[in-house]
Amino acid sequence: MTKAIFTVSENSEYRDAVDLYHFPKTYLRQVQAAKGDLVIFYQPRRNDGANSAGGAQAYFAVARVTNVRPDPEANGLFYADLAERLDFDHPVPFKRGDFYYESLLRREDGGTNRGAFGRSVRNLPDAEFALILKEGFDQEPAEPGFHLEGVAVPEEEPLPEVVPRPIIQQVVSRRFRNAAFRRQVLEAYDNTCAVTGLRVLDAAGKPEVQAAHVRAVSSDGPDVVRNGIALTGTVHWLFDRGLISVTDEYTLMISPNGIPEQLDAWLQPGRALILPHQQRLQPHRDYLAWHRKHFFRG
């Protein structure tokens, strides 16, 4: 197994999805080498900002390749099945100053290796993979003066010290993923419940609102913001038990049974949800449809 970078773009001709990567035979060997291992997603150029990197030229998510198979509808094209998708807390640029996160992309004279950069799938060492992960999820200020394979990072462009295995192990743990998912969803919703509009902080200043998965983790729901919604504890409980759901127009659906009368003022059928302004952060309609089909008691 080998770590890899998968390039994705909203404007691509390929049919990529959260759980699928669509690619030509040119990259079959590299993708097969990554089967069973983790890969990082990279957005190559600015577009309309609809994807998880927000239009930035950056690394922005991680997932695991579970299978590689031919596209039954197109000769010479293939799919990589993906699982355990998790968006970064912070998109990571492909370079900082003269430092390239992928050493393959740096020429000996310090310029960009355009040939390597043009490849949509690139294998890379664990140490470089781990550094991108650490930067993407790091909550602490980066340490200056980091060196990797003889390439010095300028003091004015600090980077964290790389510790390859621990961060890779953390990313696949449920505890780490839950914490990252919660941070990202609550930030997207400004710590505000999408249904009630409540924004309550406890005595320590921590938000009481919770991050709910729309498609359940137990049913392969990914840990991405578009599969999340910020809800107070009570509303989260109702959502997970199918007593409420959400339409494709982001309005509230109420089950005819099981809702306490005391909540009637907050839970009105057809009430519009309070959502992030950016479309790329709003619940995906495919996940909402799944919740209505498999959970909602309507």
Image: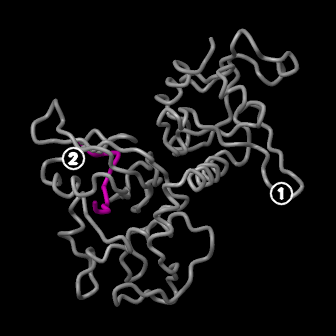
Pick whichever of labels 1 and 2 is earlier in the sequence.
2
- In the shown orientation, is residue 21 left or right of residue 228? left
Q: Is residue 194 above or below residue 101?
A: above
Residue in the image at 70% along x and 22% along y: 271
Q: Position of residue 201 (x, y in %)?
A: 83, 50
Looking at the rendered structure, the secondary structure element under dot 2 is strand
- In the shown orientation, is residue 167 left or right of residue 195? left
In terms of image quadrants, where is residue 59? Answer: bottom left
Q: Residues within 10 Å of mark 1 (few under 14, many from 20)?
A: few
By secondary structure, the bulk of the magenta-drawn segment is best described as loop
In terms of image quadrants, where is residue 46? Answer: bottom left
Q: Is residue 185 above or below residue 70?
A: below
Rendered-image quadrant of the C terminus:
top right
Residue 5 located within the stretch drawn in magenta? yes
Residue in the image at 69% along x and 13% along y: 255
* Alpha-carbon span between mark 1 and mark 2: 46 Å
Residue in the image at 83% along x and 57% along y: 205
- In the shown orientation, is residue 11 left or right of residue 201? left
Identify the residue under disc 2: 23
Residue in the image at 45% along x and 70% along y: 165
> For this rendering, which residue is in front, 249 or 297?
297
Magenta stretch bounds: 1-13
Q: Position of residue 48 (x, y in %)?
A: 41, 48
Extreme residue in the top direction: 256
Identify the residue under disc 1: 205
Q: Position of residue 38 (x, y in %)?
A: 37, 57
Looking at the rendered structure, the secondary structure element under dot 1 is loop
